[in-house]
Image (cartoon, coloured by chain):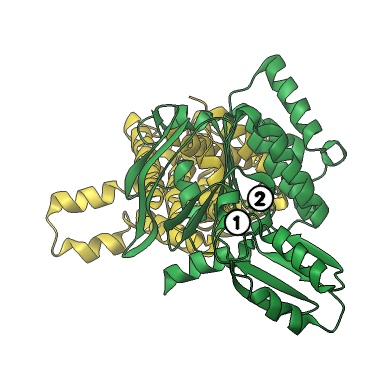
Chain colours: A green, B yellow
Amino acid sequence: MIEVSHLTKYYGDFAAVEDLSFKLVPGEILGFLGPNGAGKSTAMKMLTGFLRPTSGEVRIWGSDMWQDSLTAQRRIGYLPEGAPAYDEMTPLEFLQFIADARGLTGVERANRLGETIDVMSLQDVLGQRIETLSKGFKRRVGLAQAILHDPDVLILDEPTDGLDPNQKHQVREMIKGLSRDKIVIVSTHILEEVTAVCNRAMVLAKGRVVSDGTPQSLLAMSPYHGAVTLKSSSATLAEIAEAAGSISSVKEAILTEGGVTILPEEDDATLFATVLELSRSKGWTVDSLYVETGRLDDVFRSLTEGESR
Amino acid sequence: MRFSVILKRELLGYFATPIAYVFIAIFLVLSGVFTFYLGNFYERQQADLIPFFSFHPWLYLFLIPAISMRLWSEERKSGTLELLMTLPLSRLDIVVGKFLAAWLFAGIALALTFPIWITVNYLGDPDNGVIVASYLGSWMMAGGFLAIGSCMSAITKSQVIAFVLCGFVSLLFVMAGFPLVLDLVRGWLPLTLIDMVASLSFLTHFNAVSRGVFSLQDFLYFISVIVVWLGATSIVLDMKKGA
């Protein structure tokens, strides 16, 4: 269990992180979301004990990160930003070093090394210097050192940054696969990652938490949440928009490229049926008709930019 | 104490890159040049290694910063420091492990000068006790330089700045015993302070050692220099944590 209370970090007058508080129990995957410079990395550096907060505290299963840092750090696996590793070492030497530093010995050490190398599919590059590895492999080496001691808490700073779509997918699957009995904190500025991986999302802007909830609740904040989009190749789009706009529960019907997006006044589960009914009665040629779940980038922008003004 | 984990990794790091080999080669070549050309090893017609050892402070002055500059700066720059400091290892383990690795490495370079010891034994009949004491003293002095360098490297993520700072502070410690420096302060400092400045000098202690007078006092001097500067390293790292 992680308890973070009133964590604050000032650099001079600049508040990098301000009054961050949360509690996590095993099974939770928290996504830190925010633009660059929002304080995600600073927060993670404090959670792992690399930076000392100006005020506030971090407790990992009751152990204070500053009074009893070694006990607290033993429970954590951490992938710092950019997945740093000792370039002149091979992945095997590097992981052996981490195993020793983590105090793993004997059979347990051998088992954990074997299992981690297996999970991260590092068998083929074990003897190559880390500096010669591709970005994807480097990232996997970084993830491997983080999960090597089978930690209760995994803190991953932008684990998929700079990876290609296949590698991103792999890393996400890996995170989902590990996380049943663990606490995971991932930071990202990639929006779809939050819905793909996390069950809790925290949006940071200017060092402050501006939103904290499930990814679904984040989506629900979008004006497009529950909107119905109708795509049609017929020339009557303007007419469709006008007719849809006059439905009583509709706030606005927006004409877009090849379609019309109909925004409800408020959450309206019957909108889809209403629009479907309308299109049938009017005899429109409809190519597709679907309910929008919400657009995260809009929510993200309104949350994080609103804060900066 | 878990410093051996760090020690092992660091030593591996030295020999995994050309740094170790380049350093050792240059150290051996320069110590040879100094001994034979500047020290007039043959012309003196004496069976001792004074010409060899007397140049060590100057040799260390610019070679040791080359080892020590990377101790922390490189890790801070590449981000591995974050990895290191979030592992469940105490600060002391990390500071001591890194220092000991560098010190052992300097010791290896020093030990590889053994042909000169063979040479002097072949040519004459030197006092080998003095030579052993001098080797030990030289290694202790290298430790002093390295501890200063460790602290300077902790200050900055630029290896160049770390190199220059280490060279400068080391120079102060070497020069403190020089008549040139002592004359400068003689006019306006009380005698006890002048003695204190002189007693801080690497030269004062090393010269005694290289003449074969290796007293407990000199030994303790170098040990305390190492302890103080490693303590300072730890404090600097701690301050950076809060920065």
Point 52% across, 62% down: residue: B158
Image location of residue A179, percent across then percent down: 65, 33
Q: Amino acid at mark 2?
A: Thr
SS of the residue at dot 1?
A: helix
Q: Is residue B157 above or below residue A147?
A: below
Closest to the observer: B21 or B69? B69
Say if labels 2 and 1 share a chain. yes
User: Is residue A138 in sight in this rendering?
Assistant: yes
- Subunit that carries the residue with mark 1: A
Q: Amino acid at mark 1?
A: Leu
Point 55% across, 51% down: residue: A217
From the viewer's perspective, is A209 left or right of A216?
Answer: left
SS of the residue at dot 2?
A: helix
Closest to the observer: A61 or A11? A61
Q: Quadrant of residue B39?
A: bottom right
How many other residues sit within 10 Å of disc 1, few (<14), some (14-19) or many (≥20)? many
Q: Is residue B36 above or below residue A236?
A: above
Q: Return the mark for residue A195.
A: 2
From the viewer's perspective, is B71 left or right of A144?
Answer: left
What residue is pinned by disc 1? A219
How far apart in space, not on screen, are marks 2 and 1 (Cα)?
9 Å
